[in-house]
Amino acid sequence: MTTATPTTVRLGRATRGATRHWWLFLVSGLGWLLFAVILFRFDYLTVGAISILFGVGAFVAAGNEFALTSLVSGGWKIAHAVLGVVYVVAGVVALVNPGGTFVALAAVMSVVLVVIGAFDLTAAIMTRATAPAWWLQLVAGVAEILLGFWAAGSWNLSAVLLVAWVAAFALTRGITQIALAVGLWEARRLAAA
């Protein structure tokens, strides 16, 4: 997910390292957007295929969160670590029984979307005074929460809707990764000035 902002990034060497590698978050965000486009483009008719795609996406998101723990300090470090664990649990649940039911996958997705949406919403509000792209994270957080509650109430719907939820998850991850990249780039530009 990537909710760190230049103000939450640890000062000193970590800041220089994070801002030096701002482009990694941009590439990661573009990768998430590409993943979303691929999901919207192809027609996956089985819950197994959707579960595998969601599981892989959850593990990639967990990797992003665990990587962010080295760039942030204080409570943000704990928050990113907890979010990484949520992603790992969701990925394991999705991959343990990929041929399971639509109900099980929708339940996992709804919980993940609400938790991540709440995290993004909170981070956006807390960093609005210092993060230039805070509103992107706010919009993504609200969208994730709404999608999560929609998924929670629509467990018995079609594979098309499940694909849309997974693609929306990837889309919001891409937006927040790109917002982080912009924030880190801006911090690097300000530090050089």
Image (tube, helix red, strand yellow):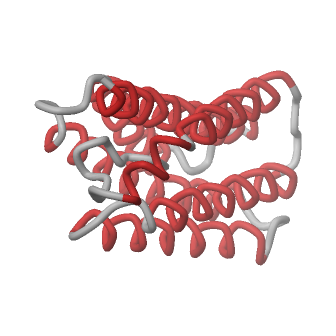
Q: Residue at x 78, y 51 (%)?
A: 53
Query: Could you tell me residue 177's position as x and y percent?
Result: 51, 37
The residue furthest front is 193
* Left or right of residue 4: residue 64: right
* Left or right of residue 80: residue 1: right
Query: Could you tell me residue 82's position as x and y percent?
Result: 39, 73
* Left or right of residue 20: residue 38: right
Q: Residue at x 14, y 44 (%)?
A: 126
Above or below — where is 114 with respect to 63?
Answer: above
Report which quarter residue 171 is drawn in: top right
Quadrant where the C terminus sits is top left
Above or below — where is 18 with respect to 112?
Answer: above
- The residue closer to the viewer here, 187 or 93, is 187
* Left or right of residue 2: residue 124: left
- The residue closer to the viewer here, 185 or 30, is 185
Query: Could you tell me residue 143's position as x and y percent?
Result: 39, 31
Q: Residue at x 49, y 49 (%)?
A: 1
Query: Could you tell me residue 157's position as x and y percent?
Result: 64, 41
Above or below — where is 163 with respect to 78?
Answer: above
Q: Residue at x 38, y 44 (%)?
A: 149
Report which quarter residue 27 is drawn in: top right
* Count of picture labels: 0
